[in-house]
Amino acid sequence: MSEIAISLKNISKCFKRYHHPIDRLKEILLPGKSRADQFWALRDINLEIPKGQTFGIVGSNGSGKSTLLQIIAGTLTPTSGEVVVNGRISALLELGSGFNPEFTGRQNVFFNGRLLGLSQKEIEDKFDPITSFADIGDFIDQPVKTYSSGMYVRLAFAVAINVDPDILIVDEALSVGDAKFQLKCFLKLKKLQEKGVTVLFVSHDSNSIKRYCQKAMLLNQGQKIIETLPNVVINHYTRLLFPEDEKNTVPNPKQELASSLSNLSEQRRTLEYRYGSHRGEIKDIRIENHEGRETLCFTSCERMIARLKVLVKDGVVNPLFAMTLKDSKGEDIYVTNTYFKNIDIPPLTAETLVEITFEQYLMVCPGNYFLSFGFVSLEEGTVFPIDRRYDVINLKVIPSTNDLSQGLVNLNSKITVKIEESTCVVVNS
């Protein structure tokens, strides 16, 4: 356990829901009869997070994410199960928790620091770095209830990261800050990662989960669906976000768990994650270079052509075809589709064969990349997946001649150097 930061064994949490306020009083005065419905926010969660790992948690609203974080942070007691936390926790949970609105920002900094186990001297030494990072000026001596949501989260995050935590918990709060502050926070997260701080990160931003986390977990209806690499988890999460057919149904968590494990086994061999209503099928995918030759290896900035053959099995009123390019961690680099490109496709009837071509230049630096393709229907603003094939193609991009530029995208810069010889004019007098 010395190398484990957080250990959860069979964690479950049940809340009571009363139909009428007086039912709670009746239950107190007349014990022995429950007058409430049981709501299980979490069921049998098992999890071990090693020290120094950045771990992501994803799931739809109401999936149990915030409840789980509160249990780990110690602000909520589980109904059953065992929680073991090794190290000092600093938690930035939902906006509004942790600060007394009647206290000033300065008072809240000292109050929270003492709660986290720091001495008065330690807080005084950290006060200037906290206020510098928060950058809220004279508002530090004003009551927190007068703060905007952005000012509140800046101060809360500044406190959380400057108390030398062993474990940092961040729950969606960063989405409140402006773009400049978010960048500042993520740069600080990178420094904490380098110092070996364990980070528990919850966000609806899929790319942030892929970018910063080494591992992730998907929660749905209080149950753990899958725990593995972030890109695989996000693929499953996306699957849950969209209904497969017009009935708008979402799979039973137990069925999804079995399906996830089965698909994960398949992914170890092919890397592809595929789902949809089966009203159509992407039957053939061909990747060509600028010469029309089939290949999966390209030179940086070379033209690539992706050709798809799609069989429509059932009528589709508003069809949409999409392509996504991801980097090696699964982060989206480029997303396009027929809707974004304002291509109007007429309704498709059953047994229709459709050929789609995507042409683009691979303006990326050398590395490994993945292509995903999708066939969906778009009806009244809702996307219904028909055949989604995530990470179906693995591309290799190699450097072009004499170009060792680094980064993610390749802007194919043209550099011109002009040297003028200096002229010395001597004036004889």
Image (cartoon, grey):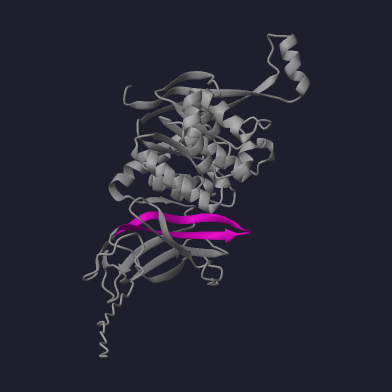
The answer to whether residue 126 is above or below residue 403 is: above
Q: State the image coordinates of residue 317 (x, y, percent, origin top left).
A: 58, 64
**Prevalent SS, magenta region:** strand
Please tell me whether residue 377 belongs to the stretch shown in magenta.
yes
Question: Which quadrant of the view contains residue 324?
Answer: bottom left
- Quadrant showing the C terminus: bottom left
Which residue occupies 65% across, 44% down? 148
- Quadrant showing the N terminus: top left
Which residue occupies 51% across, 64% down? 320
The answer to whether residue 242 is above or below residue 143 is: below
Q: State the image coordinates of residue 323 (x, y, percent, origin top left).
A: 43, 62
The answer to whether residue 67 is above or below residue 201 is: above
Judge left or right: residue 155 versus residue 308: right
Judge left or right: residue 385 versus residue 5: right
The magenta-colored residue range is: 368-395
Q: State the image coordinates of residue 192 (x, y, percent, origin top left).
A: 39, 39
Q: Would residue 252 be seen by someone viewing this image from the given angle?
A: no
